[in-house]
Amino acid sequence: MITPISPVVPAGRMARQAQPSFVLPGGRQLRPWRESDADVLVAAGRDPAIVQWNRVERLSARTAREKIARWGQRWTDEAAAIWAISRRDDDQAVGLMGIGDLDLRGGSGEILYWLLPAGRGAGAALDATLRVSRWALEELGLHRIRITHSVANPASCRVAQRAGYALEGTMRSALLHADGWHDEHLHARVAGDPWPSGG
């Protein structure tokens, strides 16, 4: 007799609830994107550092609003969870944090993030990575989550390592950026890995 394999995360666990918000250290928070954040996405598509390391599009205000609506639908479809990193004092979005490529049946996903200049240099990427990682592993119930980045992007490597994502190897010529194909680091955490002190 063959016993069917149950999904790691049952279908519907995300879709049945509203996307949560989280308080972060340093006067920041994670919250769902809003239509009024469209100008932030427009700015991200014009920021050289974000464009260099991320697959972001140049958007108009209209197409940015459409993208935000699609992110809301992707939560409902249990395909991704995308948050704005915002300042708590004025609620201004300064970056993006999310987990995409969600496979609830297989228990996996991939962390993604970027920050505008107003959000850089104060540990926002690390704090947001740790919070979403805890949510994904301990609350949603995923088994394994990963971070991938170009080997030429040491800032993302530091975030991954400080968040307790073990470097598992280098994938050759795996990531296409505007300047060509890059080798890519693969970092991962699995359920039960120890959290870094303070994380």
Image: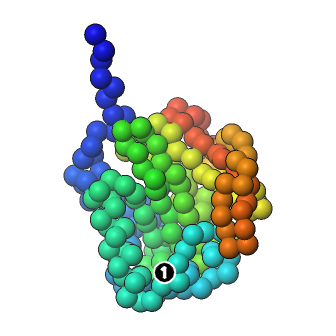
Q: Residue at x 37, y 88 (%)?
A: 62
Judge by depth and name the residue closer to the eye, 182 or 123.
182
Judge by depth and name the residue closer to the eye, 9 or 125.
9
Residue 137, x across and y down, in percent: 45, 42
> Can residue 198 be seen?
no
Judge by depth and name the residue closer to the eye, 100 or 118.
100
Q: Residue at x 48, y 85 (%)?
A: 59
Q: Which residue is mark 1?
A: 41
Residue 146, x across and y down, in percent: 57, 47
Residue 13, x across and y down, in percent: 27, 46
Q: Quadrant of residue 74?
A: bottom left
Q: How many marks?
A: 1
Which image quarter is the N terminus in? top left
Q: Residue at x 72, y 42 (%)?
A: 169
Q: Quadrant of residue 19?
A: bottom left
User: Is 19 drawn above or below residue 130 in the view shown?
Assistant: below
Identify the image's colour scheme: rainbow, by chain, secondary structure or one colour: rainbow
